[in-house]
Amino acid sequence: MKNRVKLKKCLVEIIVFSVCLLVLFLIVNRYEYYVYTKNFNNKIINIVDSLEKEYPNLTEEEIVKILNSKGNESSNVLKKYGINLNDKAIIRENDRENLKFLVVNISFLIVIVVVIIVLFMKYFKDREKNLEDITKYIKQLNKKNYSLKIESNSEDELSILKNEIYKTTVMLKEAADNSKKDKLNLKMSLEDISHQLKTPLTSILVMLDNIIDEEDMDKKTKEEFLMDIKRNVVNINFLVQSILKLSKFDANTINFVKKKVFVKDIIKEVSKNLSTLCDLKNIKLNIKGSDDVTIVCDFMWQVEAITNIVKNSIEHSYNDKVVDISYEKNNVYTMLTIKDYGVGIEKDDLPHIFERFYKGKNSSSDSIGIGLALAKTIIEKDNGSIEVIQDKVGTRFVIKYFNYL
C-alpha cells in the first residue's frame, strides 16, 4: 500500500483552513442576523411608540397580536409609499447591510478557492521537484558518481523511493570500492606470485644450463644441482597447490564435511606428514593431551591446517630441539597449543604473520609466506580462531575450536 502522507498533509491543511473559514463565516452570518434583527426591532419600537401616542386606547395585548399576526402579501398599502416587497426590504438600512455581508461572503469564498489552489499547486510543485531530483540523481548514478546523498526523513512515497535509491547507491558504492580493492589485491597477489615463482624458476634454469653446458661435470655436483632443482620444483608445486586451495576458499566452492573427530588422530596424521622434516633437523614432537578430546571439523582440511602450523614451528626451531603440541577441552572450546623454542617472530611481523605472501625477518629462504594464511582460513572455516604469541623463547600458536556446529 503506497504511502501518501504528503497528499494527506495537504488535504488536512485544506480541511483545517476551510473549517476555520466556515467558523468565521458562521460568526459573520450570526452577526448579520443580529444586525437585521436590531434594525427591525428599532423600527418596530418606533412604530409601537407612534401607535401608543396616536391610539392610546390600544392595549399591549392588541399591539402584540398585531405584531405577531401574518402580514397580507396582497395588500397594496406599502405601494403608496413606493415600496415593492418583491424588490426591496421595508427597512432600507438592511439593504445596505446585506450588500456589505454579500461582499464579505464572496470574499470568503474567493479566499477558500485561492488557498486550495495554492496548496495543491505547492504539493504538485514539490512532487515535480522531487521527481526532478530523483531523475538527476539516477543520471549521476549512471555516471558512477556515488558521492551524492538524497536521504529523506519524511514518509511519503517519493521519500521512500529516495531512501531506497540511496540504499542502492550505498550498496553500489560499496561494490565499486570492493571491486577496486579486489583488483588491487589481485594485482598485488599476482605480483607476489610472480615474484615467488621467478626466483626458483630462475634458479632451475641456471642449474639446467650448467648441467647442459658442462658435459664433463662431476657426478657429485650434478647430483647436487638435481637435488636443488627437485627442491625448487617441490616448492613451486606447493605454492601452486596452496594458491589453488586459497582461491577455492575465496570462491566459496569448498564444502566442508564436518563430523566429530579425535584431536589425537589429527595430530597423528600431522606427525606422519612432517616426519621427514623432523628427522632432518632432529626435532621431536612432544604431544600432550587426553585421547578423548574431540572437535567438530573437516578432518582432512584440519590436518592440512595443523600441518602448515607445525611445519612453520619446525622450520623456525633450532636443530635438536622440541616442538610442544598440547590440547585440552572445556565447556566452551577445545584449545590446541603449538609451541616452539626457535628464533621467534619479530614484534613488527606479528600483526602480519597470517597475511598471504608475507615473509617475516626471520623467515627461511624457502618460505613462500602462504602456509599460515591457508591454515588460518581453514581453521576459521571450522568455527575456530588462531592467534600467535611471542614468548621469551620461541613462538606459541593458540588455536581454539568452539563447541558448536
Image (cartoon, rainbow, N blue to C red):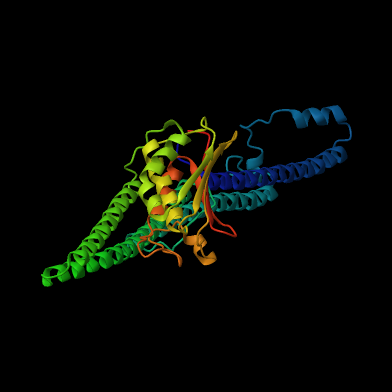
- Left or right, residue 366 beside residue 59: left
- Left or right, residue 48 beside residue 130: right
Instruction: Give the x, y percent position of residue 207.
Output: 20, 68
Q: Compare residues 260 and 339 and report the one nearer the observer.
A: 339
The quarter of the image holding the N terminus is top left
Is residue 173 in sight in this rendering?
yes
| Quarter location, residue 195 | bottom left
Is residue 335 in sight in this rendering?
no
Q: Look at the picture and state if 364 lies above or below 297.
A: below
Instruction: Give the x, y percent position of residue 217.
Output: 15, 69
- Left or right, residue 167 beside residue 84: left
Q: Compare residues 344 and 53 and report the one nearer the observer.
A: 344
Q: Residue at x 64, y 53 (%)?
A: 100
Instruction: Give the x, y percent position of residue 237.
Output: 26, 54
Q: Compare residues 51 and 270 and report the one nearer the observer.
A: 270
Q: Residue at x 49, y 54 (%)?
A: 321
Q: Residue at x 62, y 52 (%)?
A: 104
Q: Look at the picture and state if 154 lies above or below 62.
A: below
